[in-house]
Amino acid sequence: MLKLIAGCTGIIISLLATAVLAGGPQQQLAECRADNKKAYNEVEMLCRQARTSGNMGSDRNAFTAAEYKLQDHGRWNMSERLTLPACQELKRQIAQDRADIQRMMQPRRR
């Protein structure tokens, strides 16, 4: 019986240590938000550079729509209702925003 209790205690301590080392859900969410904010700021800078240089691609309306989408993602990242899974999805969406904007910035081949 004591071996069983000792074994269960060891498992519980191991699980708690793993949770502390990996950070709790709130810490993971904070790190995800910080990563998203950094990525958002980088893509926002890319948009500003594109506008300043006039390198927005041939479809300026599509570029503007991509900027608005990025801004929505930035606002959602700051939302109090953001959950960790939603934050992780937002990370993928911001990466897609970056890819879309970079693609628009490339000169079209004729």
Image: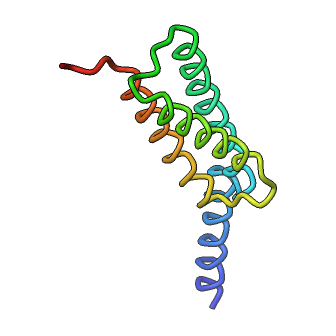
Picture quadrant where residue 34 is located: top right
Q: Left of 30 or right of it: where is 48?
A: left
Q: Residue at x 27, y 21 (%)?
A: 108
Q: Is residue 15 above or below residue 82?
A: below
Q: Residue furthest left?
A: 110
In this rendering, the count of numbered labels is 0
Q: Is residue 64 above or below residue 108?
A: below
Residue 66 location (% of width, % of height): 53, 37
Residue 82 location (% of width, % of height): 72, 57
Residue 84 location (% of width, % of height): 64, 58
Q: Left of 54 or right of it: where is 84?
A: right
Q: Residue furthest top?
A: 53
Q: Is residue 59 above or below residue 72?
A: above
Front position in the image: 5 or 99: 99
Q: Residue at x 62, y 79 (%)?
A: 8
Front position in the image: 25 or 21: 25
Quarter occupied by the C terminus: top left
Protein image colouring = rainbow
Quarter occupied by the N terminus: bottom right
